[in-house]
Image (spheres, rainbow, N blue to C red):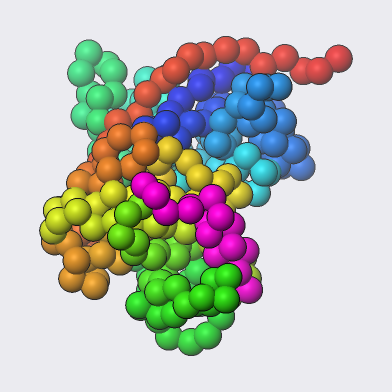
Amino acid sequence: MRFWKMHGLGNDYIVVDNRDQKIIEALMAELAKKLCERRFSVGADGLLLVSNSTVADVKMRIFNSDGSEAEMCGNGIRCFAKYCFENGVVKKTKFMVETLSGLKQILLTVKNDEVQVVKVDMGAPNWERTSLPMLGEGTCINCNLEVDKEPCSITCLSMGNPHCVTFVENVDEFPVDYVGPIIENHGAFPKRTNVGFVQVLNKGELKVRVWERGCGETLACGTGTCAAVAAANRLGKVGSKVTVHVLGGDLQVEVGKTMFLSGAAEKVYEGTLFKEP
C-alpha cells in the first residue's frame, strides 16, 4: 500500500488512497494508531484516507493519532487536496471535498503541475453550544470556565469540530501542555474539545498555539486557527483579514459569510506499507 508523508506547517499526516477500500472500516482506527506512532512507525499527527464520494469530487476521512476520527482539519485538508491533485485523483484546481463536517470547497494555486497554495472555504462558525457539543444553552462568548479551581475566560464555537478559545498575554510562556488537557477533557465538553491559546499582536495579527483533541499540541491547526480568528473578530480584537503565526509558520484567514484559510502543504516523502507477517 503506497502512502505519502505530508505536513501543513508541521502538522503532519500519512495520506493513503483508499478508494479501493483495502482498509476496511473496522481496521481504520487501529491502523491510525499503529502508523502514527513516532519512532516505531511512520509517525504523524493523523491518518488521511482518500475515499469515494457520491456527493463531492472526493471524500476525506481523518483519524487522529489516538485512533479517534475527526470531523474536519484545516491543515489536513490542504495536504489531502495537494495529494489528490498531484496523484490525478481530482485533476481540477477548484473542487469539492466531502468531510464529516460537510462539503468543503478547495481552490488551488498550481505551477508546473505542482500545488503551491491551497485555499479552503472552511464554512461559517457555529456559536451554539449544541454544535460542539457543550453543556448549557445558547452561546459561550467570553464566559468563565473553572480550570484548576481558577476562572478562565473562554469563547467556544464549532468549525465543523469543537473549539474552546482563550486569550492570553504571552502565548509563548503559557503552560499549554498543562492547561490544554484539563480543558480538552473538561466535563463541560461531552465529546472533548480542541483548545486554542491566543495572543493578539495587532488588528491584523495573532499568535496561536493549539492543544488538539486526540493529539496534544501540534505545530499548526487549521480549524483551530480559524476558530481563533473567528473568536477574536467577534470580540472586536481583529479585522477581517488576519495573519496567524503558529509554531510551524504562518496562515492567512479571511472572515466573511464564511471563513477562508490559505497556506502551504508539503510532501515530505512517499513509501510503501507492508502487511505484518
Query: Residue at point 47% right, 77% down?
Result: 151
The structure residue drawn at horizontal position 44% and vertical position 17%, both measured from the top left corner, is 268
Residue 213 visible, this angle? yes
Q: Position of residue 15 (x, y in %)?
A: 53, 28
Q: In which quarter of the image is residue 186?
A: bottom right
Question: Seen in the image, is 75 located left or right of residue 191?
Answer: left
So how many labels did they put on this image? 0
179 part of magenta stretch: yes
Which one is in front, 198 or 59?
198
Give the image location of residue 56, x and y in percent: 42, 45
Q: Is residue 150 left or right of residue 219?
A: right
Q: Is residue 127 left or right of residue 179?
A: left
- Residue found farthest to the right: 277
Looking at the image, which is closer to me, 140 or 46?
140
The residue most toward the bottom is 137
Residue 191 locus on image (x, y percent): 62, 65
Which residue sits at x=45%, y=46%? 73
In this rendering, is residue 212 above or below 9?
below
Image quadrant containing the C terminus:
top right
* Residue under the image location 57 percent in, 76 percent down: 149
Instruction: Identify the image quadrant of residue 199.
Output: bottom left
**Residue 185 placement (x, y as % from top left):** 62, 64
Quadrant housing residue 251? top left
Taking 263 as reference, is 182 above or below it? below
The quarter in which the N terminus is drawn is: top right
In the displayed image of the protein, which residue is found farthest to the front? 173
Residue 96 appears in the picture as rendered: no
Tell me, yes or no, whether the highlighted magenta stretch contains residue 249. no
Is residue 117 shown left or right of residue 163? left
Is 228 placed above or below 16 here?
Answer: below
Magenta segment, which residues?
Answer: 172-187
